[in-house]
């Protein structure tokens, strides 16, 4: 029903849509359906399926990434303190972190990168197929061989990462290594033509939600629980979920108490 509403005639006829100079993905899909040129033949069902894939895949992987980020931050309280101080110092008493603030939060972005290195949303990239014969480490890769790339293992490879199992965001200081597909040792979203099409939407969702959680609340483990008690086991699947739920206690951040300390 939700996707039918997004697709429906009300959207096409809405005055605010007609006045806008910016097309979003739904506008583009509707135009493709109307034009029906070349080999592209989009129907109403195709468009709803595409929208469902975008929304469901984006929500699941973003939730997984935020869950692992909070887990690592609670296990590393010095990192938690540092990233919260950066966010609160820059945003001040504005009340919330906005998208325009994110580019100024450099340490926070390192925290997100380090989370994606250790816990990529999907352990295996979308399958590729070799186009020609090649030889890698003594192995013959023949044409039309199905290739699966294990980005989880690459992100923990000691040949490319110092202390790979340690959550250490500072490793990205003065580093050009990025997750947009240009560095083979860091490919949480893949690269090239088959890279994740939702990379920018996914990163925006994670950064904005996570930054606000860290800005508005302090986080503690339930009474009697220590950080060493957190179960870090992973569940198998298309997305690498945390096997057991993370339970944290949110505490509203008190600006007045911080001012008194200062």
Image (cartoon, rainbow, N blue to C red):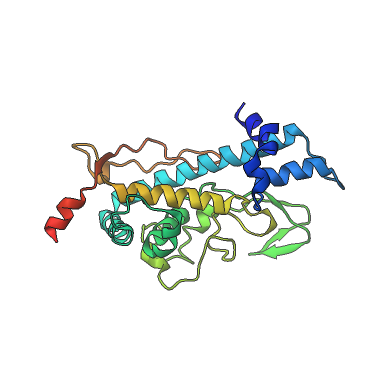
Q: Residue 72's x, y, as percent? A: 35, 50
Q: Nearer the viewer, residue 122 or 249?
A: 249
**Taking 15 as reference, is 214 left or right?**
left
Residue 45 vs 38, above or below: the answer is above
For the residue pair 175 and 33, the one nearer the viewer reads as 33
Q: Would you place residue 69 above or below residue 91 in this image?
A: above
Pick the front one: 160 or 59: 59
Q: Quadrant of the N terminus?
A: top right
Q: Position of residue 73 (x, y in %)?
A: 32, 51
Q: Residue furthest right?
A: 38
Residue displayed at 82% across by 40% down: 41
Q: Is residue 133 left or right of residue 202?
A: right
The image quadrant of residue 103 is bottom left
Write the residue at 66% across / 53% down.
Answer: 21
- Identify the residue at image location x=53%, y=49%: 202
Q: Position of residue 124 (x, y in %)?
A: 58, 48
In the figure, is residue 111 to the left or right of 55? left
- The spot of residue 79 in percent (x, y) is 30, 58
- Please say if 191 is above or below 62: below
Q: Quadrant of the C terminus?
A: bottom left
| Corner quadrant of residue 7 | top right
Residue 158 figure quarter:
bottom left
Count of residue discs: 0
């Amino acid at each position: 029903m939700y996707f039918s509403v997004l697709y429906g005639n009300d959207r096409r006829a809405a005055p605010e849509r007609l006045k806008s100079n910016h097309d979003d993905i739904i506008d583009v899909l509707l135009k493709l359906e109307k034009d029906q040129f070349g080999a592209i033949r989009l129907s109403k069902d195709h468009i709803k399926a595409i929208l469902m894939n975008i929304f469901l895949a984006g929500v699941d992987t973003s939730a997984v990434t935020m869950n692992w980020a909070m887990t690592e931050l609670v296990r590393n309280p010095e990192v938690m303190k540092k990233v919260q101080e950066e966010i609160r110092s820059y945003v001040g008493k504005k009340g919330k972190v906005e998208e325009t603030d994110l580019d100024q939060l450099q340490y926070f972005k390192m925290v997100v990168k380090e989370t994606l290195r250790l816990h990529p949303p999907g352990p295996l990239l979308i399958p590729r197929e070799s186009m020609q014969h090649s030889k890698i480490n003594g192995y013959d890769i023949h044409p039309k061989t199905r290739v699966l790339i294990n980005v989880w293992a690459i992100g923990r490879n000691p040949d490319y990462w110092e202390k790979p199992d340690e959550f250490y965001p500072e490793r990205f200081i003065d580093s050009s290594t990025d997750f947009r597909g240009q560095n083979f040792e860091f490919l949480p979203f893949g690269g090239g033509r088959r890279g994740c099409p939702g990379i920018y939407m996914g990163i925006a969702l994670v950064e904005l939600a996570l930054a606000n959680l860290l800005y508005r609340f302090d986080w503690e483990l339930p009474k009697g629980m220590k950080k060493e008690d957190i179960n870090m086991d992973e569940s198998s699947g298309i997305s690498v979920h945390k096997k057991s739920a993370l339970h944290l206690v949110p505490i509203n951040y008190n600006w007045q108490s911080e001012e008194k300390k200062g």
